[in-house]
Amino acid sequence: MKRADADSDHPGISIAQASHIGRVRAANEDQVVVLEEKGLFVLTDGMGGHAGGGVASRVAIDEIVAGVLSGANLVEAVAQANRVVVETGRQSGAPDMGTTVVALRLKGCDFELAWVGDSRAYRFNGKPERLTVDHSVVRNMVASGEIGETEARDHPLRSMLTRALGSAGLKLSEIGTASGQWHPGDYLLLCSDGLHGVLDDEQMHGLIRGAGGVQSAVDALLQAALDRGGPDNVSMVLLGPQKTDDRIISGG
């Protein structure tokens, strides 16, 4: 278990992560990167129905990290990752490779998010708050009033995306963005649909709030997803206040 180093801009925050193949998939096409000292957290989910999903996921996360470390903002880094995924697909003969992404940058008490696809970010503090909006057919149907949230969870088109990295036509304006402030007691969760596709927001909230700290919360979330069949790769990053089960590792 890690927390932000006491000399960083965001002391006292504990961090846990997990990435699991699940119980059905033949490979794990998710990727997670935690750069605690930079306040950068990125999760990608290679599109399982597309050739090269695992490659797209790795390429995207590497490019986003490189871009941010070179001074780009999150949106610029995500846009550059998209261009590289597109080019990698062309060169490798897998032009349909794709991946979702959700990226978090934490600066002191402020945070910013960028995402494409249906990997999500949540804030939990008293109630679940979804910080991202899925780029999916079903989310558009909910927004238009065609279906409700309950119908959306089991809709046959729930995995059909309207945007993903790997699209040559992706515009900067189509990259989702959000920002906010970290408040005492907040938990911030990044996760792939292998988690939020089998646990609803209230179930995740209950497991997080009922845990002794971020490590036990991540363990509980992962186990719950696996207990529900683990139909997809399950990945997450959870940031929260330091509590009893968090093993402290100072930054180097």
Image (spheres, grey):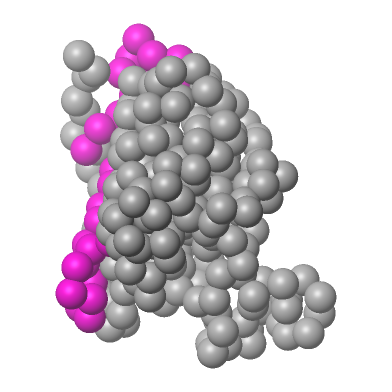
**x, y percent for residue 130:** 60, 56
Seen in the picture, residue 251 relative to 189 is either above or below; the reply is above
Residue 119 locus on image (x, y percent): 48, 58
Residue closer to the observer: 131 or 10: 131
For the point 67% across and 47% down, the residue is 171
Residue 28 colored in magenta in the image: yes
Whether residue 147 sits left or right of residue 131 in the image: it is right
Instruction: Count numbered badges in the picture.
Output: 0
Tell me residue 46's x, y (percent).
36, 61
Residue beneath the point at 33% across and 68% down:
51
Observer able to see residue 43: no
Image quarter of residue 127 = bottom right
Name the one closer to the observer, 225 or 202. 225
* Residue 216 on the magenta segment: no
250 horizontally vs 104: left or right = left
Q: Residue furthest right?
A: 144
Identify the residue at horizontal 56%, vertical 84% (top origin): 157
Instruction: Name the residue: 77% across, 71% down.
Output: 143
Check the image and name the residue furthest to the top: 7
Q: Where, by quadrant of the figure, is residue 197 drawn? A: bottom left
Residue 81 higher or lower than 128, as above or below: above
Above or below, comparing residue 90 to residue 250 in the picture: below
Q: Quadrant of the C terminus?
A: top left
Quadrant (top left, top right, bottom left, bottom right) of the N terminus: top left
- The secondary structure that dominates the magenta segment is loop
Q: Position of residue 31 (x, y in %)?
A: 30, 51
Query: In this picture, which residue range is highlighted in magenta?
Result: 1-29
- Regarding residue 97, the answer to whether it shows in the image is yes
